[in-house]
Image: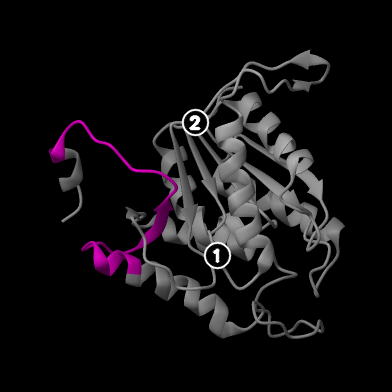
């Protein structure tokens, strides 16, 4: 299956928090979107990997993505080396997306910056014919996405572009809510973490509002481009006022 957009996340819920509105909106327009999680988030203080697997499946359904896969890298300990890059290359060659979304280039959690750089490198390597990969016993053809964008996570970074997600912020919040083990629940008996606080959940919504404010929209999601963005018509930049 060829996808239009393939979003990678170091952990299940990374994509939902920072790019969930974008995926939901693009899916509503008929584009085929998918998610690849690098790890199962097994070092998370709350819940279990099995619970997180089920939550990720539900969140993907809410966002209406076509596929969701997990590469099973070691949470907290995966490294940005050839072996791990090649696994990401296989996913890019498998789904041949026009656009790849990746973790923030730098962030509070070291897996985020590491994962973002790994995916950016893999997107380039995937286009090199002399790098041979196979999947399910079949050789893969070289393929390079047209664009790699890093979404913004815990730390505030200046975006290169902001996506107007409009009312899809509600779909985004619903998908985040699928991770019941991870986020704010006043009845939970689990230990309190940074992301389980009410303030963190609230901050997701007011960041979307603030991103929207910058472009004269109700809600937005910001992205940092891994390369220069070229356009053929300046009028394409006037869709949001």
Q: Residue furthest front?
A: 130
- Residues in magenta, as a range: 211-235
Say which element carries label 2: loop
Cα gap from disc 2 to disc 1, whole angstroms:
22 Å
Q: Foreground: 105 or 207?
A: 105
Q: Residue 86: x percent and y percent?
A: 72, 34
Say which element carries label 1: loop
The answer to whether 175 appears left or right of 224 in the picture is right
Q: Nearer the viewer, mark 2 or mark 1?
A: 1
At 59% from the left and 23% from the top, the residue drawn is 128
**Residue 147 falls in image quadrant:** top left
At 30% from the left and 64% from the top, the residue drawn is 212
Q: Residue 234: x percent and y percent?
A: 14, 39
In the rendered image, which quarter contains the N terminus?
Answer: top right
Q: Quickly name the residue at label 1.
A: 106
- State the mark number for residue 145: 2
């Amino acid at each position: 299956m060829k996808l239009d957009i393939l979003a990678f996340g170091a952990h299940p819920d990374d994509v939902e928090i920072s790019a969930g509105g974008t995926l939901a909106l693009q899916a509503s327009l008929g584009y085929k979107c998918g998610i690849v999680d690098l790890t199962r988030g097994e070092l998370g203080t709350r819940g279990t990997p099995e619970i997180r697997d089920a939550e990720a499946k539900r969140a993907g359904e809410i966002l209406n993505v076509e596929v969701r896969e997990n590469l099973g890298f070691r949470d907290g300990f995966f490294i940005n080396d050839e072996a791990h890059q090649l696994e990401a290359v296989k996913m890019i060659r498998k789904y041949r997306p026009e656009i790849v979304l990746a973790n923030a280039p730098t962030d509070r959690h070291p897996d985020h910056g590491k994962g973002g750089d790994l995916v950016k490198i893999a997107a380039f390597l995937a286009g090199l014919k002399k790098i041979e990969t196979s999947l399910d016993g079949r050789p893969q053809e070289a393929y390079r996405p047209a664009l790699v964008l890093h979404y913004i996570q815990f730390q505030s970074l200046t975006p290169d572009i902001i996506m107007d997600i409009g009312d899809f912020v509600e779909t985004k919040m619903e998908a985040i809510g699928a991770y019941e083990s991870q986020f704010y629940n006043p009845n939970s008996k689990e230990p309190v973490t940074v992301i389980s606080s009410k303030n963190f959940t609230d901050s997701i919504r007011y960041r979307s509002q603030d991103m929207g404010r910058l472009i004269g929209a109700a809600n937005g999601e910001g992205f940092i481009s891994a390369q220069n963005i070229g356009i053929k018509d300046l009028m394409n930049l006037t869709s949001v006022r």
